[in-house]
Image (cartoon, grey):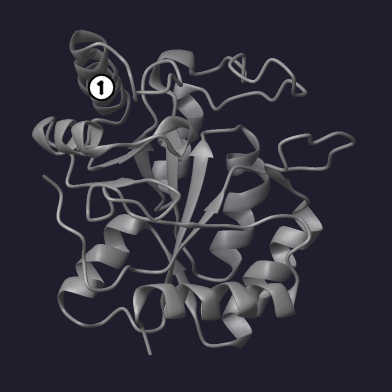
Amino acid sequence: MTGRPAAMPYILMYHSVSRYDSDPHRITVSPRRFAAQMAWLKRRGLRGVSVRELLVAEASGQAHRMVGLTFDDGYADFATEAVPVLLRYGFTATVFAVAGMLGGDNAWARDCPRKRLMTAADLRRVAGAGMEVGSHSVRHTSLVGAADAELEMELKESRVVLEEVLDREIAGFSYPYGHVGLREADSVRSAGYSYACAIWRSESSGRHALARTPVGDSDGPLRLRARRLLHDLRWGRA
């Protein structure tokens, strides 16, 4: 069983950074807004980092001025729009890729506009730029309620595929749709991942179900500050 920590590192959750006309699930942040959000972090003396880097710093008590930055689904605009901004400010981030759909699109989101996903070459390029790549399953399938064999396949095969693409260890996992229970968190740990990202606070919260703060296109400085304060109140941070 996954234990609940006394505190939770502060991790922001993004998906797509691109211009858009329709965004029914509010997963897209415009490039202009994203750049403004990263500039706001920099002005406040904060540094955006990958989850891997954040957890290492947490373990040594050095994470006070760090903010975890994550991008689910592995959209191609992470490479073209987000990474140049991150590098400009000296930030890193973690992108969670759907291993079985590299170079495809977000076919799982049937009621949303199609968005292209990064190719294997794109993943190698962003990893070479200092970004962490994690797994977001093989097919972007909700793991809650999945049969044991399917759950094992989604966790292990996605890791194997991404490690072959990048020739490096894949340490992190992100639950599709944020769906996680105690069984799924235990399975992710047993599959060899050193951490996993969820979304909401739950009975599963811990290193293998890290809660995150979703960020949207409407989040300016006041809302970003309010989100941080809410996180600190919820998790007992000063």
Q: Residue at x 15, y 78 (%)?
A: 60
Lateral position of residue 230 relative to residue 51, left or right: right
In the foreground, 117 or 220: 220
Vertically, is 160 above or below 37?
above
Lateral position of residue 104 relative to residue 231, left or right: right
Q: Residue at x 32, y 68 (%)?
A: 8
In the foreground, 195 or 209: 209
Q: Quadrant of the N terminus?
A: top left
Instruction: Where is residue 90? Give x, y as percent.
Output: 50, 70
Q: Residue at x 34, y 25 (%)?
A: 144
Lateral position of residue 211 relative to residue 164, left or right: right
Q: Which residue is the site of mark 1?
A: 164
Vertically, is 69 above or below 126?
below
Amino acid carrying label 1: it is: Glu
Instruction: Where is residue 75? Give x, y as percent.
Output: 59, 33
Q: Quadrant of the C terminus?
A: bottom left
Instruction: Where is residue 109? Give x, y as percent.
Output: 64, 20
